[in-house]
Image (spheres, grey):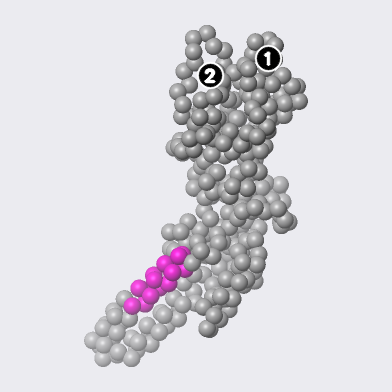
Amino acid sequence: MQSDAKQLDTQIEIVTPENIAFQYRVAGPFRRLPAYLIDLAVRAGVAAVAFGVLVFAFGMAGLASLGFGVWLTLAFLLTWFYGGVFETFYNGQTPGKRLMRIRVLSVDGRAVNALQATLRNVLRTVDGQPGLFYLLGLAVATMNDRFQRLGDLACGTMVVVEERQWYGDVVRVDDPRAIRLAAELPAGFQPSRSLARALATYVGRRENFSPSRRAQLARHLGVPLRHILDLPPETDFDRLLCALYHRTFITDQEEPPGSEPISPMVAFDKSAGGNPFASSTTETTEVVNEDLSEPRTEQPFGVR
């Protein structure tokens, strides 16, 4: 994968040899830290319970020292192989990672193998050099766009956010300016199926994007729609898409008697008595007649 010099957020794209693009959002240090602390608490809890059980059981048989030796072996396994075993057999997740909805993957988007899972956890000791308390690992992670620590760089792995299903309940639009703009749209506005799907995808995901990323993504739909609706040049594209989403999925779509449905896929002629917000340019029609369902990439976690 070639790095994108214009990356605006933590989302990356990986293209497979079959020319299928997968999009991931990499997990930063402050999302991975709680997962590590949860796993640390799990290991400490298991070790404490095991210590009490083993010492008591072997002590009753007069073999307390043997019980302590068994506990040391268990503590060694928990320290060095806890993460590797879980990430190998549970698809890149430990209990902490599962609770924080993050997962370890290879940099090519494939599931990690046993060697990668084990080695990246063993090399965690390099990131947490004595006296530095993981400052070395944090410094290395902030120097690359995938937040890879030394263990990840050595094993060719990365930690990504496990995305939720995007299509579910209707998202509530809270911006009053978008709601006001929705009320100013033509009463008979009827989006096509592809446009409605694109609106649902964008509004469902926009909270995960930075403002600059929203402006970049919304522009692809906003430019042709602004021409069709004959909106002013200073129209905010993000707000426009939220307004269209609000009209399509939330506002009552009952049309006045005798009104004709307005399709965003057709350019209207103002002189012919069409919608006053529409544009008569042929160029706009050609742009909007394309399939506007922006996501052409596969979402990796909906099918696993």
Residue 38 is inside the magenta segment: yes
- Which residue is at the front of the view, 31 or 210? 210
Q: Residue at x 39, y 70 (%)?
A: 42
Q: Give x and y (percent) for residue 254.
A: 47, 18
Q: Give x and y (percent) for residue 103.
A: 52, 59
Predominant secondary structure, magenta span? helix
Amino acid on which the number 2 mark rests in the picture: Ala
- Marks 1/2: CA distance? 16 Å
Residue assigned mark 2: 187
- How many residues crowd mark 1 within 10 Å: few (<14), some (14–19), many (20+)? few
Residue assigned mark 1: 270
- Which residue is at the front of the view, 58 or 21? 21
* Quadrant of the frame with the N terminus: bottom right
Q: Secondary structure at mark 1?
A: helix
Amino acid on which the number 1 mark rests in the picture: Lys
Q: Give x and y (percent) for residue 202.
A: 57, 39
Q: Earlier in the sequence, mark 1 or mark 2?
A: 2
Q: Is residue 86 visible?
A: no
The quarter of the picture where residue 67 lies is bottom left
- Which residue is at the front of the view, 297 or 135? 135
Residue 244 is inside the magenta segment: no
Q: Give x and y (percent) for residue 12.
A: 64, 53
Residue that sits furthest to the left in the current view: 60
What span is colored magenta in the figure? 34-48
Q: Is residue 66 visible?
A: yes
Q: Secondary structure at mark 2?
A: loop
